[in-house]
Image (tube, rainbow, N blue to C red):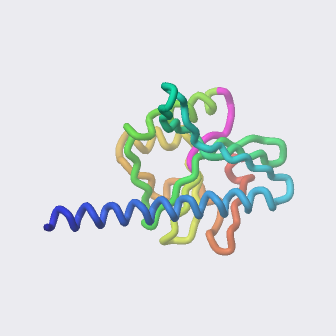
Amino acid sequence: MKAMAGSYNRSRGGLFAKKAGSGFEHRFYHYCNGEEDTCCVRVFDGCLRVAKNKLIQTFQPFDFIVVHKKRVIFCDTKTTQSGSYSINEKKVAYQLQELGRLAKMGQCAGYLIEYREIGEYRFFPIETIREILKTRKSLPAGLGIFIGETWPMEILFDKILDQ
């Protein structure tokens, strides 16, 4: 019976995390498009037809393309209740690879993480993520660039672009 309880709790935790992530993406999108000199485009996951009646889900390497004062930020949004965001490198390898390709071309690319416990947003450029992952499997808030507070929502895009 204990195994079932653990599985149930993980399932509930996963649903809560997914709901929190969707809520953050929704708030982020509307915040960006309400700011002067800022435009945000949502990049949705999609699907691919592999047979007449068979579709498979496809994933995108990032959630948003943000243009702020004529400069572009490619970012994937993450949210966590704790002060550190855990990463499964196998799950996000494609994402890290593609964001890295954009960074090599001189573009600003990385993770924008909402740390709900401390009420802050932090940005992690892809180069910083790769450096951190050499020694640990999570992104603690203190290693990211502070870019704003969660309430009222405020994101300082200039701090991301000036890094």
Q: Residue furthest right?
A: 36
Q: Residue furthest left?
A: 1
| Residue 79 percent coordinates (x, y) | 51, 59
Residue drawn at 39 percent across, 53 percent down? 86
Q: Which residues are magenta?
A: 105-111
Q: How many marks?
A: 0
| Residue 74 percent coordinates (x, y) | 66, 41
Question: In the figure, 77 relative to 57: above or below?
Answer: below
Question: In the figure, 47 relative to 117: above or below?
Answer: above
Residue drawn at 25 percent across, 61 percent down? 7
Residue drawn at 75 percent across, 57 percent down? 32
| Residue 12 percent coordinates (x, y) | 36, 66
Between 143 and 58, the one nearer to me in the picture: 58
The verdict on residue 67 being magenta is no
Q: Split into 4 quadrants, where in the image is the N terminus?
A: bottom left
Between 47 and 54, the one nearer to me in the picture: 54
Q: Is residue 8 left or right of residue 129?
A: left
Question: In the figure, 66 relative to 95: above or below?
Answer: below
Q: Residue furthest bottom?
A: 151
| Residue 68 percent coordinates (x, y) | 79, 48
